Image: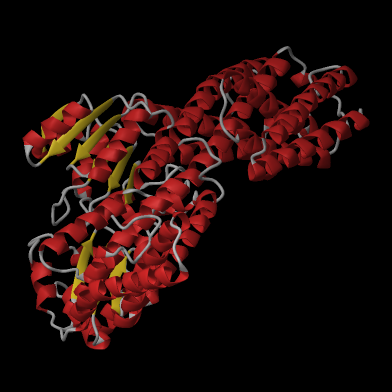
Amino acid sequence: MTLLFALAFAGYVMATAFYIVFFVTQKKTIRTTARNILLATGLVHTIIIIGRYVAAGHTPLTTHHDTVSFFAWSVTWAFLSFRWRYRVKNFGTFVSIVVMSLMIIAALSSRVITPLPPALQSAWLPIHASIAIMADGFLALAFCGGIMYLLLERELKQKRFGLFFSRLPSLEALDSLNQHCIAIGFPLMTVGIITGSFWAKQAWGSYWHWDPKETWSLITWFLYAALLHLRFTVGWRGRRVAIMAIIGFCSVLFTLWGVTYLLSGAHSYVR
Amino acid sequence: MSVDTIQILGVNHKTAPIAVREKLSFSDDPEAPFATLNAIDVCDEFCFLSTCNRVEVIYTSRRQEEAARAVRRFLFSNCDVSAEEAEEYTYLHQGRAAVHHLFRVASSLDSMVVGEPQILGQLKDAYRKSGDRGGPGVILNRMLHKAFSVAKRIRTETDIGGHAVSISYAAVELAKKIFGKLDNKKVLLVGAGEMAELAAEHLVNQGVAEVIVANRTLERAVTLARCFKGLAVSLSELIPQLEVIDILISSTGAPGFILHKDDVRSVMRKRRNRPLFLIDIAVPRDLDPRLNDLENVYLYDMDDLNNVVEMNKSEREQEAGVAERIVSEDCLKFLQWLDNMELSPTITALMKKADGIRRAELKKTFSHLDLSKKDKKSIDKLTGSIINKLLHDPILFLKENHTAEQKQQKLDLIRQMFSLDKDPYGSH
């Protein structure tokens, strides 16, 4: 298991390295190599998650290590599934950096499987946790798109053309990437919150507790809801929604870590 | 004829920012610059070139310092810049450097967008206009014709124009960076100019959906719109049109801004913030530079477009290297001609040419005639005195007392009449 994780970790590092080299040199063969490494590593990572499931006897999303590892896995597969639908030039470089960062965090946290408290033993666990984290995977893509948008827009506005001008796709492509990612990520997040509240009803007796994690999930949800609302009714686009996608993702990360470590509540079982 | 009499004084995109250049453009009275230059006594010959990116005076003078001062005063007569500042914004090339500079300008090596084809036409136009007003004389006529042939040679022998490097290409590249696909985008052409039309044509080739033309005179707009199978509107409809278009190319001769920040701010709301790409290729500028501060509005003027083109520089560097070699080569040839534009080299060349013909013809004749040595000698003598007598008058004509200007004209006439300047590329 440890060996497999090391293999996946090395795979992500290599994919990221290849993607960065490709970003600089723009040689197509390097991109193909990077993509193949990422795909293979994604498969190995799937096996790891199944292995953890078998070892723990329940869905392995209750420890910090497993959660972050699953997060990295969902970003990878969200990206790979996206690529299958349509291509965004040099997107892989940005995504692989996010994935690698998550894997570093996962590697540094404890891999000990703690027994699950009886309150949390429910069929809702796999549904709620996996959907919520998969939503985060797509929102991470929107975050990468947002960063790329701001980098390119900055060069276009200031008329100083450096590394990004020739390498990034058009502003319009990045804007529609943002829309697509959030159009998938936001409904998943909504389902994640609803299933979470059913689980809360089952475990603690009421649908909503206002514990910090729930509150922050709701704040994040409102941020993305506002983004979609402003896009479709007021006509916000481009820079503003790119910034909102970045802020939204920061809120996602805070819900994941900030709440767990800075505030405490019912969800603090999950470490 | 000393090469040092040739000077070029001017400003271009490298030496002066657009804010200075637009004040220099002599658009109000087309005759004024020629009248002023004609009135500068210390300049013997002149040619006046004014384009969006450069204003320069090519002239000859034997009192160079005085002439440079007068020409500089003329260039900056419309704007309040101190003499020191004016000196800072201008370049002054003399002699060999001036010839080299003109050849580089003509062949588009000194252009903002190296290899762009418009400059040659603009230079020919400037030469024709100056010529109509008695500007260029023997030296400049020769020098400009030589410049045209250098440009032509470079165009045929190198691929300098092949990388689609032009302002219009830069505009297309930027449009693609902003919009991705252009097939559902609309272009509005404001004002008609060669470069604007070219940019529109490039965009049409990239598949833009529609071209709308707005012009001060509707008639011209209609004609142009027909070329692009588009719609013609009057200039007063500019702002309502902004709601439907995506790319605007402006190149009017208007003295001030035709579009202000507040006009566009309110339009953006109606456009639901769809991006708007504004291209300003007019000098003086048509579009308020502050428009670029608006969100989702991308404004590029001439100077900005240059930056885009810079990115393709490495591709062109090689071709430009070859072109520079051609320029140096032809520069040397011109200087040789100039050296010969003196009395004694011309007389020597004339005699040499005649003697050469004489010898060749004698050889031909003697080869099939059986003549004694004595006969041959007397025929040789006879032909020699024929050419001497024949050339006596032209040489006298050259040596007669005359002014410097007349002397050059005479030298030029004789050199042309006897084609003493063998030039493989022709001088038109």
Q: Residue at x 18, y 44 (%)?
A: B263
Q: Residue B166 location in percent, x, y?
A: 38, 46
Given residues A39 and A162, the one toward you in this image is A162
Q: Residue B32 location in percent, x, y?
A: 8, 67
Q: Is residue A27 left or right of residue B207?
A: right
Query: From this viewpoint, is residue B98 visible?
Result: no
- Quadrant location of residue B9? bottom left
Quarter placement of the C terminus of chain B? bottom left
Quarter placement of the N terminus of chain B? bottom left
Query: From this viewpoint, is residue B228 visible?
Result: yes
Tag count: 0
Given residues B246 and A71, the one toward you in this image is B246
Q: Is residue B63 above or below residue B45?
A: below
Q: Residue at x 75, y 20 (%)?
A: A120
Q: Is residue B294 left or right of residue A24?
A: left
Q: Residue B101 location in percent, x, y?
A: 37, 68
Given residues A8 and B404, the one toward you in this image is B404
